[in-house]
Image: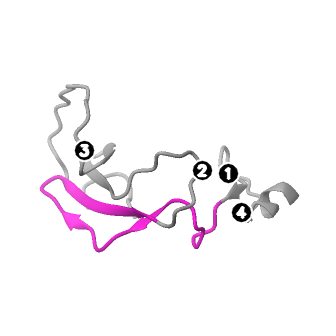
Amino acid sequence: QEVCEARGCTWCATDVPNAPWCFFPEDSPYGYSVGGSSEETTKGWRVTLNKRQALSLFGNDISPVTLEVEFQTKDRLRFRLYDPNRQRFEVPLKIDSPGVTADEANYDVE
């Protein structure tokens, strides 16, 4: 707990299996924040994420990053993070999905 809090993180012990006890607080200078509002797509949502500050934990950060959320089936969600300014190789994997709405899914996304 001391090491966690010394890093500026939040410590929260929990009984939830595999849940982290140490994590960055919401107002942390690390990570990304939502840039603007989410855009509804035919299969889900698209959101732009912007790097919060110049601080970096791993280096070579990309900003902005696009997050696409796709409701594929009632029990399957696909999310994709990518650099909207630079194309990269993506595995040409076709997954058939009937496409469902958020209301039809057996899960919630916030």
Where is residue 24 drawn, in percent x and y?
64, 61
On the picture, is 66 further left or further right than 14? left
On the picture, is 109 further left or further right than 102? right
Where is residue 30 drawn, in percent x and y?
57, 61
Q: Is residue 102 visible?
A: no
The mark nearer the N terminus, 3 or 4, is: 4
The mark nearer the N terminus, 4 or 1, is: 4
Q: Amino acid at mark 4?
A: Cys
Instruction: Report which residue position mark 3 lands on.
Output: 86
Residue stretch in magenta: 24-51
Residues packed near mark 4 inside 10 Å, few (<14), some (14 to 19) or many (20 plus): some
Where is residue 103 drawn, in percent x and y?
26, 61
Instruction: Report which residue position mark 4 lands on.
Output: 9
The mark nearer the N terminus, 3 or 2, is: 2
Where is residue 57 drawn, in percent x and y?
60, 50
Kindly report which numbered mark, 3 or 1, lies closer to the viewer in this rendering: 3
Distance of label 3 from label 1 (alpha carbons): 33 Å
Label 1 SS:
loop
Kindly report which numbered mark, 4 or 1, lies closer to the viewer in this rendering: 4
Instruction: Report which residue position mark 2 lands on.
Output: 57
Task: Tell which residue pokes out farthest to the right in this image.
Answer: 2
Query: Which image quadrant: the C terminus?
Result: bottom left
Distance of label 3 from label 2 (alpha carbons): 22 Å
Label 2 SS:
loop
The mark nearer the N terminus, 2 or 1, is: 1
Residue 49 location, quadrant: bottom left
The mark nearer the N terminus, 4 or 2, is: 4
Q: Residue at x 20, y 30 (%)?
A: 95
Instruction: Report which residue position mark 1 lands on.
Output: 20
Residues packed near mark 3 inside 10 Å, few (<14), some (14 to 19) or many (20 plus): few
Q: Amino acid at mark 1?
A: Pro
